[in-house]
Amino acid sequence: MTASQIAVPGGRLHVVDEGYGPPIVLIHAGVADLRAWDDVVRPLHHAGYRVIRHDVRGFGQSTTEDVEFSHHADVLAVLDAAGVERAVLVGNSKGGMIAYDTAIASPDRVVAVVGVAAGVGGYDGGMTPDEIPINEEYERVDSVEPFDAVALTDFEVRVWLAGPLQPLDRVSPELRTRFFEMDLPLNEQGRVRGRQVPLDPPANDRLAELRCPVLAIAGTLDFSECVAAARHLEADAPNAHALIWDDVAHMIGMEQPHRLAGAIAEFVEPFRPWE
């Protein structure tokens, strides 16, 4: 395993590079850091892949100044620093949106994309009536004065790890602790995130340009918009397939890492070799 810090305009990205074989880049969710993929890495190694992860700018051990930046440009910087011409991108939640944006903006660098409980930039899948009060409570906890980072993190453990309409004990205390420890520093005030420049036009308006193979995985225990986004991609992107699991929520790589790694490996196997 090689860990490094690479320079990007106005910031530094913490990168972990492990294994040998065709490269797969894992991009974490917006409530976590690269450790969310810890249990997915080993089975991908065993399947014969090099796995590259980075903390997204302003998350984990990656830092940024208060500058404008684009996440997809940062992904390309990670590829360049690793000497990788083309890679499979796997993104969870916000990381999936980054992966889709990168595949549209730089199609020559992306072999395929696996979106894991991922949205699509510019797409609104709506909420069910049961989800509306949860979203309202989320906004309340996030804006209460004085701000309570611990209360917000506890809430996010319930909705993102266990699932918005699921009991907290659906997931183990160990997983809850791991998620809490990643998420709490992200919620503490004073963290500099930079100013993201979104893809323009957004990915949802450019799905015809998302030509690489896409596997969109979502769980029915998650917010319904994630399943809707996967179905939307399957219907409107040129080469996309949705895979819906009925027993997982948002952090699928933490809940069922071996199952997810197996689905990724099975999906990308026909594209080998790529370097």
Image: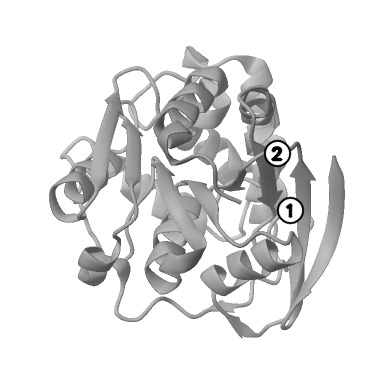
**Is 270 situated above or below 83?**
above
Give the residue displayed 59% in from the left and 14% down from the top.
172
Mark 1: give few (<14), some (14-19) or many (20+) Cα within 10 Å.
some
**Is 67 situated above or below 93?**
below
* Image quarter of residue 151: top right
**Is 156 situated above or below 89?**
above
User: Left or right of 201: which side holds 192?
Assistant: right
Distance from disc 2 to disc 1, alpha carbons, whole Å, reads 9 Å
Q: Amino acid at mark 2?
A: Arg
**Secondary-structure class at tag 1:** loop
Q: Which residue is mark 1?
A: 60
User: Left or right of 267: which side holds 272?
Assistant: right
Q: Is residue 165 visible?
A: yes
Residue 210 image point, x, y percent: 30, 61
**Secondary-structure class at tag 2:** helix
Residue placed most toward the observer, 104 or 84: 84
Residue 193 image point, x, y percent: 64, 70
Mark 2: give few (<14), some (14-19) or many (20+) Cα within 10 Å.
some
Residue 178 image point, x, y percent: 69, 30
Q: Amino acid at mark 1?
A: Gly
Residue at the outermost front position: 273
* Badge 2 vs badge 1, beta-carbon distance below 8 Å: yes
Earlier residue among tags 2 and 1: 2
Residue placed most toward the observer, 34 or 129: 34
As drawn, the label of residue 35 is 2
